[in-house]
Amino acid sequence: MSRRARIYRVLLAVACVTWVELGGSGLVAATSIDIGKEGVGAAPAEFNVSRGRWKIVGDATATAGLAIEQSGVQTTEDRFPLAIYKTAAVKNAEISLRLKADGGKSDQGGGIAVRLSGPQDYYLVQVDALRDRVLFSLVSNGASEEIAGVDADIASHSWHTLTVRAVDNQFTVSLDGVWVFTGFDRTLSRAGRVALWTKGDSITRFDQIEIEPLQ
């Protein structure tokens, strides 16, 4: 075997190990996630659930009459439920979804986790309907550090469109089609998973989930 061939095989092996660790492959085309494959009452087929109680529910106000619901948790260890998209890992992408805060005494809201390498390491864009805030945070080893945040009118029991455009160290966040802020951070520089996120006893519904990879 030539030296060039040996180098190629080593590089290929390294690339394969990297993607196995991430648990998937890169997304190459815009994707709109079909949340109704398993029907009402089932777990969402396109997601791996990490904590929480996630299921498909009927909702006449949802785009296709169906939504993904996280129905709230109480225990400390389950405080941040995640539903992690199975299919691909991305670094630079625009992720958009609709969410509705439908209940919760101590928390109401939800968000999008990006560049997720595990349940305790990711960037988070969230809406907080109790406190009327939109936040961008780094979650590292389970500890959350706020990077940017603004006050916003976030009505409970109403759908809101949340969008994050992640390009290298720049994260542009929009709510209901209006830019709210741009945050900057370099900590997580590799591709990672996209996930739905909620907090505490929030009862939150999601639909119209779209992921568009960016160059």
Image: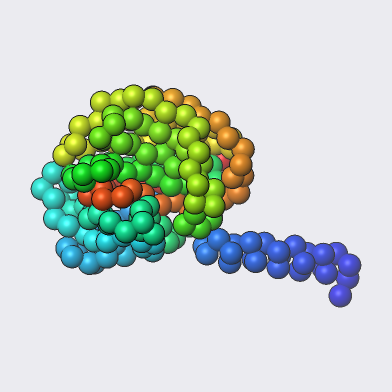
In the rendered image, residue 121, in percent from the top left (x then y), is placed at 52, 51
Q: How many marks?
A: 0
**Rendering colour mode:** rainbow
In the rendered image, residue 160, in percent from the top left (x then y), is placed at 25, 35
Quick check: can you spot residue 87? Answer: yes
- Specify whether 141 is left or right of 105: right
In the rendered image, residue 51, in percent from the top left (x then y), is placed at 36, 61
Q: Quadrant of the C terminus?
A: top right
Above or below, 45 against 125 in this view is below
In the rendered image, residue 145, in percent from the top left (x then y), is placed at 50, 38
Q: Quadrant of the N terminus?
A: bottom right
The one of 117 and 143 positioned closer to us in this rendering: 143
Above or below, 108 against 7 in this view is above
| Residue at the image point whose x is 24% and y is 61% from the top | 55
Q: Which residue is the extreme one toward the bottom?
A: 1
Above or below, 125 against 195 in this view is above
- Specify whether 164 is left or right of 175: right
- Specify whether 109 is left or right of 121: left
| Residue at the image point whose x is 25% and y is 48% from the top | 202
The one of 7 and 99 positioned closer to us in this rendering: 99
The one of 127 and 195 positioned closer to us in this rendering: 127
The one of 2 and 145 positioned closer to us in this rendering: 145
Above or below, 202 against 135 in this view is below
Q: Which residue is the extreme one toward the front?
A: 76
| Residue at the image point whose x is 82% and y is 64% from the top | 7
- Specify whether 10 is left or right of 166: right
Q: Which residue is the extreme one toward the left?
A: 60
Quick check: can you spot residue 123? Answer: no
| Residue at the image point whose x is 22% and y is 55% from the top | 71
